[in-house]
Image (cartoon, rainbow, N blue to C red):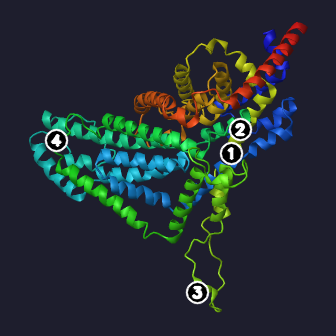
């Protein structure tokens, strides 16, 4: 106990107190996440950890502006419904069989989540999924013809002292038919068929709903701007290892995009098999006419929704062009395997943030309607104001500014750990882990973080764990990216609980999923994610990030950490001797 109090008297002890306090607030959400992220601005200067002129700039690093550019681009896409047009077009191409529709939903959601937020992608795709499901299984109210048929059958059946049983068509015409709990004395084969149809309908509905948040979480890992933990990794790398330049938009995409595709395919197979989209036993069984009709209705619903969007507008074409430019320029700035366009400028002057902000600034003055060249020569033409692709008022309303503060809080925390010596102190307590083989360490780290993030915000989780992983890598004498990248992506692999991620909560709030559904589906998803991530880190990631060697930029940090560690231990021992 005396050692604990003596530690609090030291700078690293006070920094540890702030981090534990913020971790507690983030996990319990006693304060809003963004408000908790502002605590370093107050506590670090008052506790003598960092002066304010070093804390405040962490909230506006170039990494924050890269993320802001992605959020503004997403806002413009949503403003002109380009994301909805893309989603419906993909669904028209993949077909309307349940397994194909689930695949279409997952592909579309994951692609959108690469550029939009995971929450926005899920919130946009769920209404589309519900409309398709209602077309497959009908509305809650049965048709007049069925009611007439039901009344005629009921009169004849009651003469034989039998209860009426809904037909297969009536089952498929109800989205939430829960009034069949009464015992019905009918032939066992008819009752069995009805139960199978009800089970099939329920399972397909669950498979649709559960695939969307999972695809959003997986898709967000494919780009640096797809989710906050990816950008926190980039920011903390620049803080701990300023000489590290191997992680940028292009190199990350080359690593994470193949991983996303493989995980998406395996996840689709698992969900389709589990919920009846793919029937391994009866794949040759001929579909009933009822299901054929239902699929035809679903096809018509998708086509009708697409037609409601009308012809492609000039604004949509412009947004799509700038979106492609946004992605291409970020990818080609410095792809590492060939010289990028940034090599034409002075080294170190052009970053991903410069690229992203350059594109999104154009959105605020580029016209949303096709300009007419006659206007310049027509003296009587009215001088009307042209609406741009995106107004600042719309950006203010739709951009989640709290995420910018959350990122800044993470970078401020990392800076405090580095400047106070806390990261070195933590590294000195990791001696028992020095004998762990690095491949085993990757699996253990991914499992621990994936489980931790089931109960806590993924952003808060990675902010807490990254400094520890960086010091652990130094102790193990491995490339820090070998441990930090799995920890970052593992934060997005939270599939088991409704509270794990906002997309999970949105899908669960529909009322068609139970906790046990997400738990049994998410358990194998988590396991697949851990194994696939380990495979990626030990194969193609090694060549992309040069993971096979201990880099010079990490060696410089290790030498500085060793000298600082000796100083910290001397100060700690002197404090203990005084006590």
Q: Confirm or deny contact between disc 3 and disc 1 (CB under 8 A).
A: no
- At horizontal 58% and vertical 78% (from top left) the residue drawn is 371
Residue at the spot of label 4: 285
In this rendering, which labeled residue sits more in front, label 4 or label 3?
3
Q: Confirm or deny contact between disc 1 and disc 2 (CB under 8 A).
A: yes
The residues bearing labels 4 and 2 have C-alpha atoms spaced at a distance of 58 Å
Q: Earlier in the sequence, mark 4 or mark 2?
A: 2
Q: Secondary structure at mark 3?
A: helix
Residue at the spot of label 1: 63
Q: Quadrant of the N terminus?
A: top right
The one nearer the camera, 290 or 88, is 88
Residue at the spot of label 2: 238
Residue 374: image tag: 3
The one nearer the camera, 193 or 493, is 493
Q: Quadrant of the C terminus?
A: top right
The residues bearing labels 4 and 3 have C-alpha atoms spaced at a distance of 63 Å
Q: Earlier in the sequence, mark 4 or mark 1?
A: 1
Name the outermost residue toward the left.
160
């Amino acid at each position: 106990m005396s050692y604990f109090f003596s530690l609090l008297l030291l700078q690293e002890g006070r920094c540890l107190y702030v981090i534990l306090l913020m971790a507690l607030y983030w996990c319990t959400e006693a304060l809003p996440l963004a408000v908790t992220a502002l605590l370093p601005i107050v506590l670090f200067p008052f506790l003598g950890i960092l002066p304010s002129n070093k804390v405040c700039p962490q909230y506006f690093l170039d990494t924050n502006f890269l993320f802001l550019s992605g959020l503004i681009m997403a806002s413009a896409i949503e403003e002109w419904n380009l994301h909805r047009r893309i989603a419906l077009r993909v669904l028209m191409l993949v077909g309307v069989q349940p397994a194909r529709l689930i695949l279409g939903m997952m592909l579309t959601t994951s692609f959108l989540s690469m550029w939009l937020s995971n929450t926005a992608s899920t919130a946009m795709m769920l209404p589309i999924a519900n409309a398709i499901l209602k077309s497959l299984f009908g509305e809650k109210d049965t048709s007049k013809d069925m009611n007439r048929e039901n009344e005629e059958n009921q009169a004849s059946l009651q003469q034989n002292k039998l209860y009426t049983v809904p037909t297969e068509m009536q089952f498929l015409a109800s989205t939430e038919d829960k009034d069949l709990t009464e015992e019905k004395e009918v032939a066992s084969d008819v009752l069995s068929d009805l139960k199978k149809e009800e089970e099939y309908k329920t399972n397909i509905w669950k498979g649709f709903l559960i695939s969307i948040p999972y695809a959003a979480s997986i898709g967000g890992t494919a780009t640096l701007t797809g989710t906050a933990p990816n950008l926190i990794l980039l920011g903390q790398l620049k803080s701990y290892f300023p000489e590290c330049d191997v992680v940028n938009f292009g190199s990350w995409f080359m690593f994470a995009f193949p991983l996303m595709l493989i995980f998406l395919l395996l996840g689709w197979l698992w969900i389709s098999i589990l919920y009846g989209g793919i029937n391994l036993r009866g794949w040759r069984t001929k579909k009933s006419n009822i299901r054929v009709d239902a699929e035809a209705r679903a096809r018509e619903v998708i086509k009708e929704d697409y037609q409601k969007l009308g012809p492609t507008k000039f604004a949509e074409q412009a947004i799509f062009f700038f979106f492609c430019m946004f992605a291409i320029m970020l990818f080609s700035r410095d792809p590492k395997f060939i010289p990028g366009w940034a090599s034409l400028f002075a080294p170190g002057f052009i970053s991903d943030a410069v690229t992203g902000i350059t594109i999104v600034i154009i959105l605020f003055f580029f016209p949303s309607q096709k300009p007419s060249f006659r206007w310049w020569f027509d003296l009587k033409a009215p001088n009307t104001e042209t609406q741009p692709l995106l107004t600042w008022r719309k950006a203010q309303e739709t951009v989640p500014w709290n995420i910018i503060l959350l990122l800044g809080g993470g970078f401020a925390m990392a800076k405090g750990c580095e400047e106070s010596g806390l990261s070195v102190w933590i590294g000195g307590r990791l001696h028992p882990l020095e004998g762990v083989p690095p491949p085993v360490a990757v699996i253990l780290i991914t499992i621990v973080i994936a489980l931790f993030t089931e109960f806590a915000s993924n952003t808060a989780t990675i902010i807490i764990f990254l400094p520890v992983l960086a010091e652990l890598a130094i102790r193990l004498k491995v490339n820090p990216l070998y441990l930090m990248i799995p920890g970052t992506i593992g934060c997005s692999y939270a599939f088991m609980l409704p509270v794990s991620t906002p997309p999970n909560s949105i899908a669960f709030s529909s009322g068609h999923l139970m906790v046990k559904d997400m738990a049994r589906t998410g358990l194998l998803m988590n396991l697949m994610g851990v194994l696939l991530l380990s495979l990626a880190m030990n194969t193609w990631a090694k060549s992309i990030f040069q993971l096979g060697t201990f880099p010079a930029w990490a060696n410089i940090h290790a030498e500085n950490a060793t000298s600082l560690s000796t100083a910290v231990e001397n100060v700690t021992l002197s404090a203990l001797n005084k006590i």
